[in-house]
Structure formats: C-alpha cells, structure tokens
Image (cartoon, grey):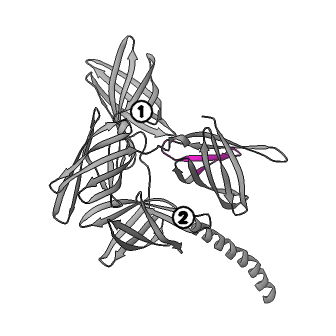
Amino acid sequence: MSRILNKTIGRILVPACLMLLTQASLILAAEDITGQWEMTMEFGGRDSYAMLTISKNADGTLAGKWGSRDNLSDVKFQDGKLTFVRTIQFGDQEFSMDYAGTLKDGKITGAMSSDQGEFDVNGVRFKPKSPALGTWDIRFNIGDRDITGQLAVSEKPDGTLEGKWMSDRGNTVISNVKFKDGKLTFSRKSTFGDNTYESDFDGTIAGNDITGVFKSQQGEMPAKGTRVGAALVGKWDLTSVSEFGTMPGMMRINGDMTGRYEFFGGEIPMKDLKLYGNQVTFALEMGWGDETFTLNFKGTLDGKNLKGQMTSDRGTSEITGKKAEEASAVIGTWEFTRETQQETRTSMLKIMPDMTGTYTFRDNPVDIKDLKVNGNNVSFKIEMSFNDRQFTMEFKGKIEDKTLKGEFITQRGAREAIGKKID
C-alpha cells in the first residue's frame, strides 16, 4: 500500500515540481538586461544621469554603451548580476572604472569603482516622455473669425496629463487631457463675459504637428497646431573646441523644451532653455560639493545645424552641432504576410509616436518590448503564449523605403519577414 502511495505521490509531485521550475525560469527570463536604462548617480554631492544601452551580439554575448560614445567591455549578466568595464579617454590619458550591479524587479542597483574610490550608480528602464508634452500653437475658425491660442500640456507626478490654455480672449479651462495611441483628447470650457462655450477636442499628434476637431453643440471646428520649439526638439551631436582640445558631445531636447547635455558620458539637466526665432540659449550648472559654476550657451540655429559659444568664468568653448536623424520612419502600421501550405497568414506591427507598439497575430495584440531604432535598423522582442507555453520571439530588420525586411528569431531558428507600411 505504501509503495503504491509513494508512486502516486511521485506522479503528482514530479510534474508539479517541473511546473514550478518552468515558472521560475520564466520569471528569471523576464528580467532581461538588454535595452536602454536611465542611470542615476551622485557625484560630488550632485545628481548626474547617463544612458546605459545593453545589446546582444549575434553569438549571444553582450555589448554595451555608456552615453552616446563610450563603448563598454567585458559586459556580463548572469544570475541577475551585471558587470562591465567603462574606459574613459581624456586627451592622451585613459582610465577605467568597474561596475557591478544587480537587476531585480526592473531596477538596477550597483556601484562604479576605480582606484579613486566608489560611488552608487542605480538605474531604471528608460521611458520616453509622452509626445503630447509641450506647448502647442493651435489655430481654428469660428465662422469667419480666426482663433489662435496656445495649449500647454504637462505631466502630473502621478503620470496623468493636464493642460492649460493661453489666449488674449476670455478665460479657458482645459480638463480630461488624455493621450493614447497617438491620439490627444481634452475638454475645453471658455468664458467670454456672461457666455460660456464647451467643446471636446479629438486629434492626432504626428511628430511636431497636431490635427484634430473641436466638437460642440454648434458643430465641428477643424483645428491644426504646431509644437513650440519644434526646430530644436531632438538629439544633437555636438563638437566642443577649447584650449583643452576638441571633444565630442551630445544634447537631447524633449518636446516640452526640457533637455540634458552630455558631458563625459554623464547627462546634466539644461536650465532656462529658450528658442527665440533662431537664437538658442540655455545654462548648465556644474560643481563639486559647495563649489559651483555656471556655463551659459548662446547660439544660432540654422536648419539642422547649430553654432554658438559656451562661456563661464573659466573660459569659452566654441560649439557646433548637427541634428541627428529621427527614428520617426518606423512609426506607423506594418503588415507582414507569410505563405504556408494551408493559408496566407497576416500579422500587424503598430509603432506609436512614443516608441511603444503592439504586434497582432490571429487577432491577439501583444505589446512589443525593447524597441530599438538605429538609423534604418530596427529590433524588438515579443513575449507570446501558445498552448499554455510562453516563448520569446525577436525581430531584427532594416527599413527600406516603405518596406521593413528582416527575420523573426526564436529558439527553433529564424524565418524571413517582410512588412509593408500601410499607414
């Protein structure tokens, strides 16, 4: 009897244990280190930031980049532990720092160390700001009157959006601001003397342009808008020339006219960023402990080129910049078709302006992860379920005009995929 009971228990426990082990491996697999991470560090008593990018080579080994230029070496990730070596060059001098951190619950906790000491460096997944943020010049018509105003969209601490309408006419309150899948909606209540008018806006944001309609009891009013400071928004590759030599740099300007300036791989928040006509100004506050100094930039914008000077009480640097290519070519809907012996299978890839997206196969939409766009090269991952089993599928390809050519890669191998842009 006991022998039969032991066999019965074994038949139950062994599959159960295997299931638990499988679930545990899936949980560990979900802690993927590849992608972009926003790293925060306290250096000299001040917070500094940096972009850490981890990617996977064709042979399965890892590669990394700190900031826009510093390639990392000896990048390893095992059992939730991330390590790498960062080498910094300054003129003819070169020195290295070692990083060791732990990935848990989507956060990296660790420290950078060298012969000079050690300091904490922690990170979270990089999340692009909502494309709706910023100030928009809005134009529409009421009868034969041209109406203009500015809509300022900002983000609350809880992540929800709020809006403010600025105009010389009347008093307007904006509420229920929402942005999803490239669509911006909000409610508008305007008061002129004793009269109050209410309307709802429904529009689409494409880059730095917005197109939509105000709907009210009086009818529909088509509206268009452009982002204030649009010419400056984006990533800029910079070159700085001073008495200390020539150094590369980078700055990234967000749609809400906030930005960061990269300095030796670290990113410093820009202050008082303004664009008047083609004149650009901003300030950087730097220092160590209680000792601080300010760098002031004044320059001229000419299309995709920027030229100016960075000045402080420590000297002047000549700055030139060129706007980097945007990743907007991938935004839209792509249709993939594949011929099988039984049928033609169709799947849809949809990329939003905020660089999130979904992959739909057999009417089942799945969020894509780790979307990367480098020039014309595109890659992303999909975690899917089939017959109670989960697996990861990775896409690697290149944009060629209105075609996205590449491969879907799984543990079983790779298959060719060609997508046509339909929207």
Mark 1: secondary structure: strand
Tell me if residue 353 is in the magenta stretch. Answer: yes
Image quadrant assignment for residue 155: top left
Q: Is residue 203 above or below residue 298?
A: above
Residue at image x 32%, y 75%?
118
- Residue drawn at x 14%, y 55% is 313
Q: Is residue 241 above or below residue 21?
A: above
Residue 102 in percent (x, y) is at 45, 72
Question: Which is more N-terminal, label 1 or label 2?
Answer: 2
Q: Quadrant of residue 24?
A: bottom right
Q: Which residue is mark 1?
A: 186
256 or 328, which lies in front? 328
The range drawn in magenta is 352-367
Q: Amino acid at mark 2?
A: Asp
Label 2 sits on residue: 32
Residue 236, percent across and down? Answer: 38, 47
* Residue sticking out furthest to the bottom: 2
**Which residue corresponds to the image point at 31% horizontal and 27% vertical from the top-left?**
172
In the figure, is residue 415 to the left or right of 152? Answer: right
At label 1, counting other C-alpha atoms closer than 10 Å, the crowd grade (few under 14, some 14-19, many 20 or more) is some
Marks 2 and 1, Cα distance to the nearest angstrom? 37 Å
